[in-house]
Amino acid sequence: MKPLDPRLVGRSHGVRSLLVLTAGLGLASAGTVIAQAVVIATLVDQLFSSRPLTHTAWALAGVFLVRGLLHWANSSVSERAAVTVKAELRHELANDLLDARRLGPAPDPAAVTAIMGPGFDAFDGYVSRFLPQLVLVCLVPPVVIATMFFVDPASAAIVAITLPLSVAFMVLIGLMTRDKLSRRWESLERLSLHFAQVLDGLVVLKLFGRRQERNLTAVGQRHRDETMRSLRLAFLSSLVLELVATLSVALVAVSVGLRVVDGGMDLRPALIVLLLAPEAYLPVRQLGMMFHDSTEGAAAVTVALDLLDHDRQTGGQNAPSLRTSTIRLSNVSVQHPSRSTPSLVIDELEIHPGEYVAVVGPTGCGKSTLLDVMLSFIVPTAGHITVAGTDLREIDPDQWRHQIAWVPQVPGLIAGTISDNVRLACAVASDVNVRQALDDAGAADLPLSRTVSEAGSDVSAGERRRIAVARALLRVRVGGAQLVLLDEPTAGLDDDREASVLASLAALDATVVVVAHRQATISAATRVIRVQTPTAVIA
């Protein structure tokens, strides 16, 4: 795991600004460190030689003041940057999850929950303390060692030789920490996912008397154990870094002290070297103290950037009107990396405007994948989908989906009224339009004002599906959609409601493609497409 992921620098303006400002403040801080050592050494030398101290004392006060102001400026810039970077990434991640151009599998809910909650909180220490300190480590020690070289080359050589030992120990500690941190992050994701699953199934668990306190306690204990292991390693590694720095400064002090006693070195340069030696190690020691606090932030950065790092649709052409355009699939196949066989294979298929097509086939043959391909959620691994001669890859996905009404196998709901859920298809629809759509979807018994939860625990599977069908009808009648894609829309409905739904779909002035298993749904279609693995045959 890298201390600073290059993707973060390229993606975040806040991080780039922080690094530039911190570099400038770091160089100024290095200058004040050197000035402080020179002024203090001069002041002590003047004390022993009985010379006036007024100007030197004022100079020392000025150096202290400037160094304090630089420290305040660095802290202020860093804290503001942490807030900015966290807001940038959270906003970008939220927009990316809802981006119409997003391709690839849906992200793991546990990873999203972990990063959007406690994961982003770890950015505070990482951005506000670790990254500025990383810049100081790159700038201050070289400047200090160069200054020591002009004063006393022997002492500079000792520091130049021993300082890399501290860096080497930090690298070794980082390698030891990587696996422990990975296990801690996995335990946090597992805890988030387990808790979310318990909440989702709380009603069923209570019904069957399955108590989850013991399981939650065990998962939480594993997370605590991993956290304590990380803390123990942090304390031990800090001790090692402090020991190396202390011994290195002692070598410089012994060397300088012996030469001062023998008269081979004056007091003033000796004091300058003694004061600068600890300052060369200080940024590295402080970075070591912050390292373990930052590893969680670095891990969160990696997770967030991995979620953002995926393929996107690039098409920008206007979508042809589906009222007059034929959709053609030629040698289309979809191969998922996790499967050894293709998810969908279609040699040739045409869907003409105004058709009512039923897609049938055995489970797992790719019927739902076909809808995903037509919705432009998935780009075919091979072959082409053209609309009026234009490749679907080249069409703007937002414009394309604006012409489509979609009913998935498990329709989504929002917290609100049934009217709010149906109006997702068309926000400007009137209550009369919504009521008519529900009636035609076999949901005449559902009042517009009835409230439903996002999880849908207060509606049946049939009611959920009827709401989704009403949503699709409204999108065609009021929203102007010209293609309706449905994945088993009548599953869970009785015969009367199924007949109502099928009659409403047949009456639509749009192209209808329905994935079906029930015979009534298949019989209502004007054409049947039989999908098999690995080929598709048009009946």
Image (cartoon, rainbow, N blue to C red):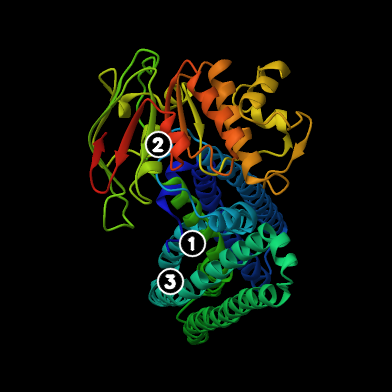
Name the residue tied to disc 1.
Answer: 137
Numbered disc in front, either 2 or 1: 2
The correct choice, above or below, for 55 with respect to 220 in the image is above
Whether residue 174 is visible to the viewer of this picture, yes or no, is: yes
Residue 154 spot, x, y in % from top left: 39, 76
Q: Residue at x 65, y 78 (%)?
A: 218
Residue 73 spot, x, y in % from top left: 65, 47
Whether residue 32 is visible to the viewer of this picture, yes or no, is: no
Name the residue tied to disc 3.
Answer: 152
Q: Residue at x 34, y 44 (%)?
A: 361
Q: Secondary structure at mark 2?
A: helix
Numbered disc in front, either 2 or 3: 2
Tell me the tag on residue 371.
2
Q: Residue at x 49, y 43 (%)?
A: 16
Depth order, front residue of 106/222: 106
Q: Secondary structure at mark 3?
A: loop
Amino acid at circle 3: Asp
> Which image quarter is the C terminus in?
top left
For the residues marked 2 and 3, what is the alpha-carbon distance in whole angstroms? 75 Å
Horizontal placement of 427 versus 164: left or right? right
**Nearer-N-terminus badge (2/1):** 1
Amino acid at circle 2: Leu
